[in-house]
Image (cartoon, rainbow, N blue to C red):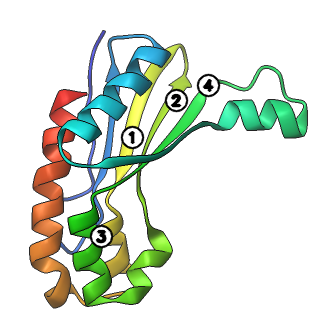
Amino acid sequence: MQSHFTETNMDTDMVDVLRKEVPYGFDEAVKRVEDACVSEGFGLQLTKGVHDIFKQKLGIDDYPKYTAILVCNPHLAKRALDISKDMGTIFPCSFTVYEENGKVMVAHTSIMRIGVEVGLASKEDMEDLIEETGKRIRKVWDKI
């Protein structure tokens, strides 16, 4: 299966959006994301099938599979909160695994950069943390 990688910009002025098709099944993709996150020091907070919630709460039986995987690296989270307590309003980091047009996709968006973009913390204060977080997420991304 073909993989593709999309991001808006690597500059700290823009938000990274990572997205790729993976060459394995949905359940294996979820497991790989969880394992990659844990191996790079992120703790699993929650893995939840949104499609299951839609089935249970809305009676939708055929919604394509969509799972949110919420993770946290306590060292990075503390640094962000030490810069601005408001950064906690967009915690934790998340990955999604979803089905789209017969493909299994994985996606992630940088919350540290989002925090700067929406004014939760200054670019200057977040610059080093954004760089370190980006390096760690890249290691996770490469393992998926």
Tag 1 residue: 107
Tag 3 residue: 77
Image quarter of residue 125:
bottom left
In percent of width and height, residue 75 lies at 21, 67
In percent of width and height, residue 11 lies at 14, 67
Q: Nearer the viewer, mark 3 or mark 4?
A: 3
Q: Amino acid at mark 4?
A: Lys
Residue occupying image coordinates x 20% and y 59%: 9
Query: Which quadrant, please, contains the C terminus?
Result: top left
* Mark pair 3, 4: CA separation: 29 Å
Q: Is residue 140 left or right of residue 31?
A: left
Q: Amino acid at mark 1?
A: Ala
Kindly indicate whether the residue at mark 4 contacts the one at mark 2 (C-beta within 8 angstroms). yes
* Mark pair 1, 4: CA separation: 14 Å
Residue at disc 3, secondary structure = helix
* Mark pair 2, 4: CA separation: 5 Å
Tag 2 residue: 98
In percent of width and height, residue 128 lies at 9, 75
Q: Is residue 76 left or right of residue 81?
A: left
Mark 1 and mark 2 lie on one chain; the one further toward the N terminus is 2
Q: Residues within 10 Å of mark 1 (few under 14, many from 20)?
A: some
Mark 3 and mark 2 lie on one chain; the one further toward the N terminus is 3
Mark 3 and mark 4 lie on one chain; the one further toward the N terminus is 4
In percent of width and height, residue 135 lies at 10, 53
